[in-house]
Structure formats: structure tokens, C-alpha cells
């Protein structure tokens, strides 16, 4: 596998050269880059992109031999506030232009909740919310197809695409070669299904394994009946099930570590690689 990390887990938001130097010093060459979370001194909101700006970022990445596996633009495409939803869609489309210029594999997002404050609300799980997601994503994917850029979609148990079945339905409805899946298996685990996590993982590969292009990796524990994030190897996640499927179906896939840090990144990778070699 190709291991990497979220850029904002490597160092605090800083000047661009400082950030990329920190990535290089950690010997990480695959990152998820959320521009506004990581790079200080520039305005990455809608309307500030230009090809020259994108080339500048690409040049600095190339100098440090860093590849952007995922350009993060985590929006709420089901925001009930129509003005804010449109702003989010416009921002994502602009990030597609950044991705094209800097050579990112894809622009990634989760699929949101039907709440302007991003709270968990029942309407998120309804057909109406799903149709709003399709409305947003059809505009985004139309732009992606014209630009030749991939849109990466990540399912989460309390978002609009909350299970493998909904992700499969979405991929069929979009019916586009420019839409692929980011699989974060821990994000599919809930208080209701954590004891059946192997089934959840297997179902994801069975229903849309052909579309999985990037893996997010962390761990989880259960506290007061609810899943809580944990460092890799310090929780309850069944790595063997995931890595067995990856070894069989997805050679050299990029795995981006979450809930890691510079002090433990290399030991986390070593832990995962040992399991990968064993399964």
C-alpha cells in the first residue's frame, strides 16, 4: 500500500513553505491537503483561484516530492440554507480547478447533514435529503467531467450516505466515471452495528469495491455506548478484514492515516504493514 497522512495532522496551519517542509521532513509523500486548514497567508474561499496560483502550489509540492492523493473540500451539500448550499457547491467546483493544476488524484467530501449547523437530525436519512444531495452533486460532477477531475465521496454513518447500500445507490444514480469512493470503514461504524463491523466492511467491498480509490484509516472504542475515535492499534477495529480485502482487490491503494501525529506516524504504518503482510 501507499501510506500517507492528512496534512493538518502533521503540523499546525502555517506558511506554505513551512507546511510542505514539515511533510517532507516526516518522509511522507502522500497527503490529504485541505488548503484552508493547512496553509496560512492566502484566501482559499471562492473567487481567488487562478492558474498561476495553482502552478505556484504545484511547484512547491514538486520541490518537496509530495503528492496530493486527496484535495479536501469537505462541504455540506445538503445544507437546508439554499444560499450556503450554493456557496459550498461553488467552492467545491473551484477546488476541482486547483486539483487539475496541482495534480491531485481527486477532490474529496463527505455527504452532509440536513442542518445549517451540521447537527445530526432525522431528516438527513430521508429521501428528500438524498435528492438534495443528488442536486448538489450533479452540478459538481458535471463540472468534474468537463475538467477531467475525480470527485471522491465518503460515506459516514450519520450523514446522507449513511451505509454501503446508500453509497451503492448514489454511485448508480450518478453513473459517472468521475465519481469514486473514499472508504473510511470506521466512519461506517455506529453504536448499532459495531459488533458486526466485519459484515459492514465486507458489504462495502461487495457493493462498491470497484469504486474504492482511497482509504482513510483510524481506530475506535465504545464509550457510553457510542463510538469514539482512537489511535491506530489502540481500539476495536478489525484491521484484518479490511486489509485482506485491500490485498486481494486494491494493490497499491493509498491509505491516509487519521488520528495520527508526527510522533507516531511511522510506528502506525509499521503496525498496519505487519497485519497486511500476515493476512
Image (cartoon, rainbow, N blue to C red):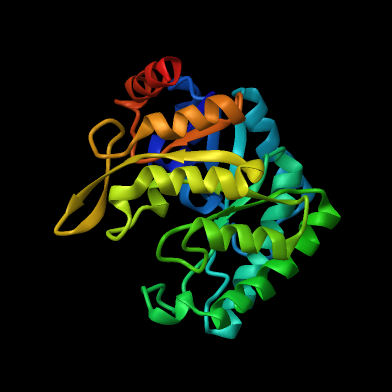
Q: As displayed, is residue 139 above or below residue 20?
A: below
Q: Residue at x 25, y 51 (%)?
A: 228
Pick the front one: 62 or 162: 162
Spot occupied by residue 115 in the image (x, y as percentages of width and height):
44, 79
Spot occupied by residue 141 in the image (x, y as percentages of width and height):
74, 61
Q: As displayed, is residue 83 above or below residue 96?
A: below
Tell me where residue 254 sits by quadrant.
top right
Pick the front one: 124 or 98: 124
Spot occupied by residue 163 in the image (x, y as percentages of width and height):
48, 59
Q: As displayed, is residue 72 above or below residue 274?
A: below
Q: Residue at x 38, y 78 (%)?
A: 121
Say whether residue 270 is left or right of residue 207.
Answer: left
Q: Is residue 66 visible?
A: no
Q: Residue at x 39, y 80 (%)?
A: 122
Say whether residue 206 is left or right of residue 187.
Answer: right
Q: Residue at x 58, y 70 (%)?
A: 77
Spot occupied by residue 232 in the image (x, y as percentages of width and height):
31, 33
Q: Split into 4 quadrants, where in the image is the N terminus?
A: top right
Q: As displayed, is residue 266 above or below residue 207?
A: above
Q: Is residue 75 visible?
A: yes
Tell me where residue 158 sits by quadrant.
bottom left
Q: How many marks?
A: 0
Residue ranking furthest to the left: 224
Q: Split into 4 quadrants, where in the image is the C terminus?
A: top left
Amino acid at each position: 500500500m501507499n501510506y500517507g497522512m492528512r496534512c493538518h495532522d502533521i503540523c499546525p496551519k502555517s506558511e506554505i513553505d513551512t507546511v510542505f517542509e514539515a511533510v517532507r521532513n516526516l518522509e511522507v509523500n502522500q497527503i490529504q491537503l485541505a488548503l484552508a486548514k493547512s496553509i496560512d497567508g492566502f484566501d482559499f474561499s471562492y473567487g481567488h483561484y487562478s492558474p498561476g496560483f495553482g502552478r505556484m502550489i504545484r511547484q512547491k509540492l514538486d520541490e518537496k516530492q509530495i503528492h496530493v492523493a486527496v484535495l479536501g473540500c469537505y462541504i455540506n451539500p445538503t445544507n437546508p440554507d439554499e444560499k450556503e448550499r450554493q456557496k459550498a457547491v461553488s467552492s467545491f467546483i473551484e477546488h476541482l480547478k486547483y486539483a487539475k493544476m496541482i495534480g491531485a488524484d481527486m477532490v474529496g467530501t463527505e455527504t452532509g447533514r440536513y442542518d445549517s449547523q451540521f447537527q445530526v437530525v432525522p431528516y438527513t436519512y430521508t429521501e428528500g435529503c438524498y435528492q438534495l444531495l443528488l442536486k448538489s452533486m450533479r452540478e459538481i460532477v458535471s463540472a468534474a467531467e468537463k475538467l477531467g477531475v475525480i470527485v471522491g465521496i465518503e460515506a459516514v454513518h450519520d450523514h446522507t450516505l449513511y451505509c454501503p447500500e446508500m453509497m451503492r445507490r448514489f454511485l448508480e444514480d450518478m453513473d459517472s466515471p468521475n465519481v469514486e469512493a473514499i472508504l473510511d470503514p470506521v466512519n461506517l461504524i455506529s453504536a448499532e452495528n459495531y459488533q458486526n463491523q466485519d459484515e459492514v466492511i465486507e458489504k462495502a467491498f461487495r457493493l462498491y469495491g470497484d469504486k474504492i480509490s482511497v482509504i482513510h484509516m483510524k481506530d475506535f472504542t465504545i464509550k457510553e455506548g457510542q463510538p469514539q475515535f482512537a489511535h491506530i492499534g489502540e481500539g476495536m477495529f478489525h484491521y484484518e478484514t479490511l486489509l485482506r480485502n485491500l490485498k486481494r482487490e486494491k494493490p497499491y491503494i493509498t491509505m491516509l492515516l487519521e488520528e495520527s501525529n508526527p510522533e507516531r506516524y511511522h510506528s502506525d504504518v509499521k503496525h498496519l504493514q505487519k497485519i497486511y503482510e500476515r493476512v
